[in-house]
Amino acid sequence: PELLPEATPPPELAFATLFGTSYHEGLIIYFGAGCQETPLHFDEEENIIFVLRGSKHFVLYPPNQSENLYPGEYPRHYFSNVPPGGDADRFPKFAQARSVEVTVKEGEALYLPYGWWHAVRGSEEPNLTLNYWYDVHPN
């Protein structure tokens, strides 16, 4: 709660008009103990990630790679069935998936568009991010 006055509410960010309505949960803070991993998935909102401490390493796949990422069945359609590190026998098309890797460091931000697949690994040291989520702009 002590950090809340330091954070700008999602609708008040200078670039908020570029997006739709802020996500119903608003601002989300992630505390990572170090070396934590988030499996391959996509978010159903626009996402702006600010790294306040440590770093986050992202492996990003554009939406056109979905066929190679083996999405789960609804309602888990936004998670990939491919395990971390892959499994060429069970998921042969995964080797064809085109990705981009980026490490977002303390003081940096990443815009993650709706539908972009990503797997995330936190830095070795504890890490902290602020995530602003928005609906897709109606226009």
Image: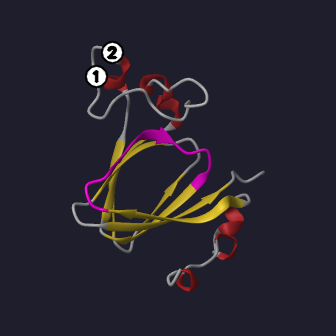
Q: Residue furthest right?
A: 139
Residue 29 position (above or below residue 80): below
* In front of the other: 106 or 5: 5
Residue 80 appears left or right of 122 = right
Please tell me which residue lies in front, 112 or 56.
56
Question: Residue shown at 69%/53% (left/top)?
Answer: 135
Q: Residues in magenta? A: 33-46
41 is within the stretch colored magenta: yes
Mark 1 touching mark 2, by CB under 8 A? yes
Amino acid type indicated by mark 1 = Asp
Dot 2 corresponds to which residue? 90
- Residue 5 sits above or below residue 114 on the image: below
Residue 43: x and y in percent read 55, 45
Q: Which mark is residue 96?
A: none
Colouring method of the image: secondary structure
Where in the figure is residue 10, as x and y percent of width and height? 64, 70
